[in-house]
């Protein structure tokens, strides 16, 4: 009873110092939480990937296409359940700053392979029926105020010209890990135009999306696919969707590592701030600790008071920081949806916040507690007066 | 003084402090008996070793050699943790600057030593109320030290010292920070504790008026006891 009361009252003895320290911890935890969420957002594609999907691309590079004729060969390979394909379009909507992922795909099978894209049946039917139609994710449609039936014009970068699409469907994600900022249309429409404007680039796809019958055999199926095209003009590289996504991230690994480092540096800095607060606190109360010792309280009690106060201050800041992370992340998600379509605070981030808070509290208390325990009662009492 | 039982027996006690390579002797071969119910004052110039001797008797410092036996327990042989336990139930402390915890009320300050006991909350409350009644502060028990005068704070400190019913009370300059009237009140209260409750009080003081309240005065000079003649009042 007394000890907890004493810890809480001690925490408020220097209100300004405590408020500033709590504020520091709050900002640190908020920054830590946001940086960890940025890292999670970076890996969102990896996390959302399915074990039953393989991506087959040109072995040289993703920028090199594969012949359309590979589709049937892949479909016949043992273990393959379904095959679809797509090509990156890279169109610009009005202005370059309005970036979003847009690609052409063989829709019928692609949507079957991606059951996490939820499209109302009548919209899906309308999309499949009309070759000039397109589908947009809900977040993207909301962002630009698109409605079903709107004409969306994209300026081609890889495929020159202005491309008009009729928005026939808006998909939602099955859960909040699904990117709702993509835009796609029929590959057949793209190919039809390409045949006219650049016939040498026709009947080529950017990648094949392969669904396997049994995810446990995905690796063997990938090997079989690549073997089937060995020594051909366009050799393939097949990997799981997860590995494919990780391949993208590896290109920006230095940035991810930098963000991770900064997130830990933030925690390290706040550890120094809290340690300084606790050192000042313990130094001021060294006489009081001596009084506690004279009354028979041991090192366990003294260190309990110091660690308790450190935990109260740090965890108050941690909890406030965690609570603030949600609205701030919401603003982030809305402002940076182009770069981070999935910007959600993972439970792991919150666990790491709590762990960081506790580690800071304990580390900050170690030296003051050790000093308070070690100092002799007579020396401690001499500090009073 | 009610009887002739020695509650404290000090034999050949020596203590020195080290400052770098320098060894500074503080107490030199002290031997002394203190009777149960005795009110004893140590006087002497600054640096004579009074407070060191008090700290050794109270078990908050360690002697270099010699022995101190309090109520049959040779405390010079006890470990740090055993000493802490022993202090909790055998020694009550009264300091010059009261040393109350500023964020706790008078009641909570007095209750502190009892938190280490096995008493229930109700029993603790009874003990605290009794101790505050003895020092005549029942009406201020929910005040914090900052809301009390110096004399009242020292009375709270005395209540904290007696609440565990310790064998001895040690007081280091208990009136050193008080005005004359408050000091007189505190000394009268200490006198009452000895006369009415048979408490043994060992006090260090520079104040001759305070010392006059004691049954005996022992003088320390350069770590040697009775360097001046003992005076009985």
Image (cartoon, coloured by chain):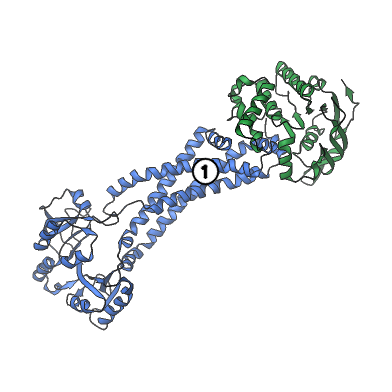
Q: Position of residue A89 (x, y in %)?
A: 19, 63
Residue annotated with mark 1: A311
Side of A214 where A194 appears, left or right: left
Chain under disc 1: A
Q: Is any part of residue A287 visible from this angle?
A: yes
Compared with A341, B99 (above or below) is above
Compared with B7, A258 (above or below) is below
Q: Quadrant of residue B187?
A: top right
Residue under the image location 13 percent in, 66 percent down: A190
The outermost residue toward the top is B181
Q: Position of residue A383 (x, y in %)?
A: 68, 35
Side of A19 where B179 appears, left or right: right
The outermost residue toward the right is B229
Where the N terminus of chain A falls, by quadrant? top right
Q: Quadrant of residue B155?
A: top right
Where the C terminus of chain A falls, by quadrant? top right
The colour chain A appears in is blue
Residue under the image location 20 percent in, 77 percent down: A70
Q: Position of residue A148 (x, y in %)?
A: 12, 52
Q: Position of residue A313 (x, y in %)?
A: 50, 40
The colour chain B appears in is green
Quick one: SS at disc 1?
A: helix
Q: Nearer the viewer, residue B46 or A369?
A: A369
Residue under the image location 13 percent in, 74 percent down: A200
Side of A335 where A30 appears, left or right: right
Q: Is any part of residue A130 visible from this angle?
A: no
Compared with B59, A265 (above or below) is below
């Amino acid at each position: 009873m007394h000890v907890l009361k004493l810890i809480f009252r001690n925490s408020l003895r220097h209100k300004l110092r405590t408020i500033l320290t709590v504020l520091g911890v709050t900002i640190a935890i908020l920054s830590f939480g946001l940086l960890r969420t940025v890292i999670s957002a970076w890996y969102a594609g990896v996390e959302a990937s399915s074990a039953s999907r393989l991506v087959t691309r040109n072995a040289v590079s993703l920028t090199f296409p594969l012949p359309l004729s590979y589709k049937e060969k892949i479909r016949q390979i043992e273990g393959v359940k379904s095959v679809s394909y797509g090509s990156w379009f890279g169109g610009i909507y009005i202005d370059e700053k309005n970036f979003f992922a847009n690609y052409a795909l063989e829709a019928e099978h692609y949507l079957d392979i991606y059951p996490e894209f939820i499209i109302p049946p009548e919209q899906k039917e309308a999309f499949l029926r009309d070759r000039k139609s397109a589908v947009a994710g809900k977040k993207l449609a909301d962002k630009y105020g698109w409605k079903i039936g709107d004409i969306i014009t994209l300026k081609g970068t890889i495929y020159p010209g202005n491309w008009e699409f009729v928005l026939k469907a808006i998909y939602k994600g099955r859960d909040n890990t699904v990117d709702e900022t993509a835009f796609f249309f029929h590959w057949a429409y793209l190919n039809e135009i390409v045949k006219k404007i650049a016939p040498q680039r026709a009947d080529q796809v950017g990648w094949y999306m392969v669904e396997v019958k049994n995810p446990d055999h995905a690796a063997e199926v990938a090997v079989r696919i690549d073997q089937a095209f060995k020594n051909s003009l366009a050799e393939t590289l097949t990997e799981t969707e997860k590995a494919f996504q990780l391949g993208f991230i590896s290109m920006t690994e230095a940035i991810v590592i930098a963000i991770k480092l900064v997130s830990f540096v933030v925690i390290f800095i706040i550890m120094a701030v809290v340690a300084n607060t606790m050192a000042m606190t313990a130094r001021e109360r060294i006489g009081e600790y001596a009084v506690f010792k004279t009354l028979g309280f041991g090192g366990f009690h003294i260190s309990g008071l110091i660690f308790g106060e450190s935990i109260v201050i740090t965890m108050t800041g941690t909890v406030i920081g965690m609570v603030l992370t949600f609205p701030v992340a919401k603003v982030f998600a809305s402002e940076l949806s182009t770069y981070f379509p999935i910007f959600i605070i993972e439970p792991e981030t919150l666990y790491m916040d709590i762990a960081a808070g506790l580690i800071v509290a304990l580390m900050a208390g170690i030296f003051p507690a050790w000093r308070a325990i070690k100092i002799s009662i007579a020396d401690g009492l001499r500090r009073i007066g | 003084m009610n009887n002739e039982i020695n509650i404290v027996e000090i034999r050949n006690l020596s203590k020195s402090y080290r400052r770098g390579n320098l060894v500074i002797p503080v107490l030199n071969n002290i031997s002394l008996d203190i009777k149960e119910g005795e009110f004893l004052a140590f006087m002497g110039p600054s640096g004579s070793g009074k407070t060191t001797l008090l700290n050794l008797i109270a078990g908050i410092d360690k002697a270099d050699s010699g022995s101190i036996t309090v109520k049959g327990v040779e405390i010079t042989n006890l470990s740090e943790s055993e000493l802490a336990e022993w202090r909790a139930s055998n020694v009550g402390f009264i300091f010059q600057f009261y040393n109350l915890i500023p964020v706790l009320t008078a009641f909570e300050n007095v209750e502190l030593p009892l938190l280490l006991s096995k008493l229930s909350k109700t029993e603790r409350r009874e003990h605290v109320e009794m101790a505050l009644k003895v020092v005549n502060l029942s009406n201020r028990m929910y005040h914090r030290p900052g809301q009390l005068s110096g004399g009242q704070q020292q009375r709270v400190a005395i209540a904290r010292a007696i609440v565990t019913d310790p064998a001895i009370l040690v007081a280091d300059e208990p009136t050193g920070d008080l005005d004359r009237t408050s000091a007189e009140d505190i000394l009268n209260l200490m006198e009452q504790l000895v006369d009415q409750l048979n408490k043994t009080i060992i006090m260090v003081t520079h104040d001759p008026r305070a010392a006059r309240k004691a049954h005996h005065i022992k003088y320390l000079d350069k770590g040697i006891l009775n360097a001046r003649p003992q005076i009985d009042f």
